[in-house]
Image: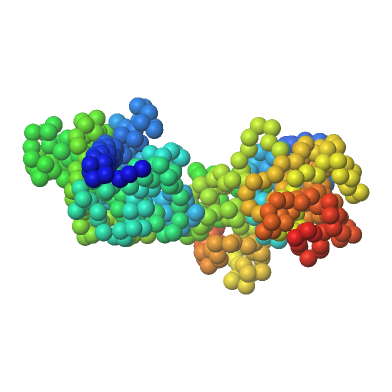
Amino acid sequence: MRITRRGLLLSAAAGGGAMLMGTVGLGMWVGAYDRRARQQDALGSSVRMMTQWIRIDDDDTVTLLGPHTEMGQGTQTSLLQIVLDELSADPAKTRYELAPADPAFTHSDAIQGMLAGEQDLSTWSGSLVEKLFGRVCELGGVMFTGGSMAVRYTGWRGIRRSAACARMMLVEAAADQLGVDPSELTTDNSAVVHAATGQRIGYGALAAAAVKLPIPERPVYKKPGDWKYIATAYPRIDIPEKVFGEPVYGIDTAVPGMRYAAIAPPPLAQGRVTGVANVPFPEFGLLGGAGFSGFAEANVGLGRGNVLADQFDARTQAAQMSTAFSVYYFFCNVGSFGGYQGIMYDAKNDVYYGASESRKDGQAAGY
Amino acid sequence: MIRFTVNGRSHEVDLEPEMPLLWVLREELELRGTKFGCGLGVCGACTIHLNGRAVRSCVTPVSAAEGADLRTIEGLGTRDEPHPIQQAWLDHQVPQCGYCQVGMQMSAAALLDSVPNPTDQDITDGITNVCRCGCYERIRSAIHGAAASVRHEEG
């Protein structure tokens, strides 16, 4: 193909136009992003999200839908303390609820924090950067608790900002209702107060009007001297249930027809257990007999297999079998040549058998 | 058939006699407050009371519970009427992750029953449970606090 001057100019113009349209389209796609609306859609119309993370009900209940789990370091309590102060919320009517595993609740604040530290990106970019991070985090499904990022970034960047914005919206709604200037109003224990006339309106009564107002781009935060909860030894909200044995840990999860499995790891690195059925176990009889319900490969980690069992005695045997390494088949990665080779291992006599001879030092034969 | 009571309720179970009591409580009776930790009777996460004595339920066969009174965390106290140990655990903000704390409180309650005014050494000797979060100092002060509150009530 010959490159002509005209052709080059035309294709450059076409390419530039396409890039421009793409950029404009991308900008519109990012600019249209509305985090509060995304969370509202995720939860449905029966709840009211005032701002990102913060739900306010008609009965004054404030719910922080926090995206972080509690491992006992007080993460959720600390996030709640931030809301109590920046929203002037009543602690008796404010609670923490773990956000659903939904893209709308992913951690754009944590990712922004990782890249920008304590710098508030909104001061020089408006909200576009926030929206971009929101889009990207939704696409990536970024949701985790760790890295000391919950309070530092999700809390101090995101939740504090959302709480401060919500408070400003509630004050503005009260100012409209009372016909006064917002500067005449203060907030206290989940209510907006007009000191001059002694009037007091609860957040629940203001929430329906406040949620229709635009979320402020420049929230005004409380001064540290006005904090009542932040930087105090506030009682941890997760302790009472732990003291009464109520929390549901992973091991407490029960589903109908649940079966129990023991992990039978292969003795060679990177081996994959592919089956134990029909292999005679002198100690335990045949797997697949009474009580044993099957075998499944666990597809996480290196070379793990599960032996499933229903009855107590079968469970015990499965557990013993998984550690006793009796006889079972497994496949072993044969290294840089790729592929897998079938191997059988007899732990009792410490002998490997294979399609071709296998070596005991952890390398399959033929490699 | 093996008969016993758990938290004052009578139960009659038809199970393999060697099944660990922990399995019976958690899976047959669905009392999941008691936790599985090591399965070897070492860590104490599964501690319950058998006739008032703290035992590791993961290594106690159900046959050993014949005719016994068992108590689990579900029967220690309630939010309205917490056991002195539970109140002290709240006051001293003891738990971190909380997984071992049910067994820890059962051990501490049994210790106070036998040694109402434990010294530091009594606590060290009497509480052999393991806490991976390392809440030992708060556990110690909470046990002293519970002992003091019981003394105060009885005094």
In the foreground, A34 or A361: A361
Which residue is at a point 66% across and 32% down the rendered structure image? A256
Q: Quarter holding the C terminus of chain A?
A: bottom right
Occupied quadrant, residue B39: bottom right
Position of B66 relative to A265 (above/below)? above
Position of residue A319 in the picture relative to residue A82 (left or right): right
The answer to whether residue B52 is visible is no
Which residue is at a point 30% across and 58% down the rendered structure image? A116
Which color scheme did the rendering employ for the protein?
Answer: rainbow
Q: Position of residue B24 (x, y in %)?
A: 73, 42
The answer to whether residue A55 is visible is yes
Q: Position of residue A191 (x, y in %)?
A: 22, 40
Position of residue A5 in the picture relative to residue A330 (left or right): left
Q: Position of residue A23 (x, y in %)?
A: 26, 42
Q: Quarter holding the N terminus of chain A?
A: top left
Position of B23 relative to B40 (above/below)? above
Which residue is at a point 53% across and 50% down the rendered structure image? A242
In the foreground, A212 or A129: A129
